[in-house]
Each structure stands twice: as C-alpha cells, then as structure tokens.
Image (cartoon, rainbow, N blue to C red):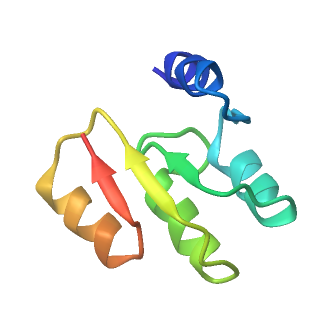
Amino acid sequence: ILTSVSIALQAEGFVTRVYSDGETALKALIDNPPDIAILDIKMPRMDGLELLRRLREKSMLPVIFLTSKDDELDEALGLAMGADDYIA
C-alpha cells in the first residue's frame, strides 16, 4: 500500500518521501519535516505509535495514520497521542 499511496499522491502533484522503517522515518521527519506525515501502525524497527510519541516530543507536524490495523484501541490511542486522523 505504501507504494500505491505514494504514486497516487505524486499523480496529484504532491512530493512524497517513503521510509521503510520507523527509525529512519523519525529522523527524516525531524530533520526535514514535510507538510504532513502519513504513518502506518505496523512498521519495522519502531511502530507507528512509538514514532508518533517520539515525534510529538519535538514537533506538532500533522499526522494521519493510514493502516490495515482496524483496532479501536489503536485508533483511540493514536488519536489521544496526537494523531490528526486515523484511517483503517
């Protein structure tokens, strides 16, 4: 889904950057923040919830979770931690 979302956004004129794991994404989001971050809950090396927690320590970058994990607890936790939206 990562590639498909990136291609669709690029087709609409958006510039995208794709990271395959949470640790790499966190460093990039802090060092060179985009206008918005789209995260998955299930990410290697650092899951999306932990990434959001660490990101919120340094930034109020808008974050949307786009995930196949349709779990009400994860959704509530993500939103409570500061995600702007959660799409499952």
Q: Residue at x 59, y 78 (%)?
A: 60
Q: Residue at x 30, y 53 (%)?
A: 86
> Can you tell which quarter of the image residue 36 is in?
bottom right
- Tell which residue pokes out farthest to the left in this image: 72
Tell me how many marks there are.
Answer: 0
> Can you tell which quarter of the image residue 74 is in?
bottom left
The N terminus, quarter of image: top left
**Seen in the image, is 39 located left or right of residue 81?**
right
Question: What x and y, as percent, mark residue 28?
Answer: 80, 53
The C terminus, quarter of image: top left
- Tell which residue pokes out farthest to the front in this image: 13
**Seen in the image, is 78 located left or right of residue 49?**
left
> Can you tell which quarter of the image residue 49 is in?
bottom left
**49 in relation to 6, above or below:** below
Q: Residue at x 61, y 69 (%)?
A: 61
Question: What x and y, as percent, mark residue 82?
Answer: 42, 75
**Front residue of 15 and 57:** 15
- Tell which residue pokes out farthest to the right in this image: 31
Question: What x and y, as percent, mark residue 18?
Answer: 69, 33
- Tell which residue pokes out farthest to the bottom in this image: 57
**Front residue of 14 and 30:** 14
**73 in relation to 60, above or below:** above
**Front residue of 56 and 47:** 56
